[in-house]
Structure formats: C-alpha cells, structure tokens
Amino acid sequence: MSAILEAVRERAVSVWTAEDMLDQSVQVVTGPLTVEQAIGNPEGKDFPIQKGKERLMEAGIRDARGQAFTDDFGAHTATLGEIAKLPLDTNFHRSVFVAALNASMASLGRTGHTIHCRNTGPRECSDKIAEHIRADYGTPKITQVGFQPAMIQALHKDFELRVLDLDPDNVGQVKRGVFIEGPETAGEALAWADLLLITGTTLANGSIDDFIDISGKALTGARALFYGTTIAGAAQLMGWDRYCPQSE
C-alpha cells in the first residue's frame, strides 16, 4: 500500500469535506479513452498508449475533467464519497481515485492542466521542458522515470540522461537515442542523478514511494520534478514540483 497515496487521499477528503462535495450527488464517471481521444496523432508511434498497454482514464465532475494513465482500465460510476472509501490496492482503484481527484481539483479551480496534450503537444512539451530544466535546474544529470519518447529525444541532446522503464519491450533497447534501463539498475540510476524527472503515472500505479518522500524530495537527495496530467491534483495538494505546459 502506498503511504504517499494514502496521504494524498487524506488531504483530498479534507478538501472534499470542506467543499461539501462528499454529500452532494456528484457523479464521477470514469472510463478509458481511445488513443485518438487521449493523444490524437502525435509525431511517432512508440508512445505506451499506442501499444495498448496503458489507457487514459477520464473522470468528469460538473464541467471539469481529470485523467489518469493506467494499465488496469474500465468504466466506473460513483460519488466522491464512495470513491474516497475505495481500497487503493489495485491499479484500477488507484486510477479511479486519481482521475476523480484531478477532476475535482479542476472543478474547484485549484489546479489546471488536467487534460493530456494531443497531436504535436508531446513534442512541444518536450522542447519546453528542456528549456524549463535549464532555467530552473541548470545542467543536471537526469534520470527519467517512465518512457516518454518525445521527452527522451529532446533531453538527451543537451543533458546526461538515463531512462528507467518497466516495459520489457523497452528495457535493454535503445529508444530515441537512449538505452532504456530496467529495475535491475534502478538503484544505481537514481543515485547517479541530480534530478529525477518522474512520470505522474507512478501515483496511479502505487510506485511513487520508491522515488520520493511525502515532501516531494527524492529519496536519493536529488531534486524531483513530475510531468504529466495524472499527478496534477496531488502535486497541488502536496506542494510537489510539476511541469506540464501543453496540457489543458
């Protein structure tokens, strides 16, 4: 069980209670989006969602939407009160909670950028995140957690970069100019880095505790920066650094 996700839930429920959202008949409907709905037609065919191993779950509250990447997807309808009590013991339950959290925070105006970018957005995001890192972090050695191909291609040109992923189709292969490492070298790759660039999907799959503490500091002492829409609401609640410029 993820202690960090439980801490996020505690803060989320506090917000939902204060805003009288638990007792309202707010319906949260989550369901997996198609590839076209999720990311359109990006430049390249190697994004995880295009391979069918992950899908983007979407929750809607009022006129707001929130999303979460997961490999365990399906439809779910519930109130926020019911979602607050879900056991966060499967990727499906975690993705339902995370998508609902993102939608609720967007509906309250407490966070933005909860909808994944589409078409040329991933490439444009990757160019911007390289500029953002140079401006805010200098020239750190970066370990990227999660396979985001456009980001890898943009970053390895200007930074020392290592990439960790769990997909056996990626591990041990050179992708977008970078050798993709797996769990067997994760400890070394994390300790090597000055900056961890972490996919927000780690929140939904429960692995986030392997990388940061509740304050958002990397366990290795490096700085940590999250990317993606999945972690939008949690980053705002917890005060974690996140950069996701092309999302809506």
Image (cartoon, grey):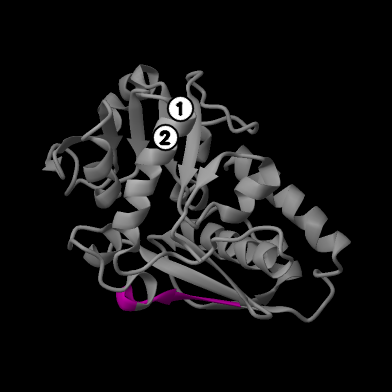
Classify mark 1: residues with Cα within 10 Å, few (<14), some (14-19) or many (20+): few
Q: Indicate whether 197 appears above or below 118.
A: above
Residue type, numbered disc 1: Tyr
Predominant SS of the magenta segment:
strand
Measuring 18% from the left and 61% from the top, which residue is drawn there? 44
Residue at image mark 2: 133
The residue stretch that appears in magenta: 29-36
Residue at image mark 1: 137
Determine if residue 88 is in view. Answer: no
Residue 113, x across and y down, in percent: 54, 61
Measuring 65% from the left and 31% from the top, which residue is drawn there? 215
Q: Secondary structure at mark 1?
A: helix
Residue type, numbered disc 2: Ile
Q: CA distance from mark 2 to mark 1?
A: 5 Å
Q: Are dots 2 and 1 in contact, CB under 8 Å?
A: yes
Q: Is 229 placed left or right of 156 in the picture?
A: right
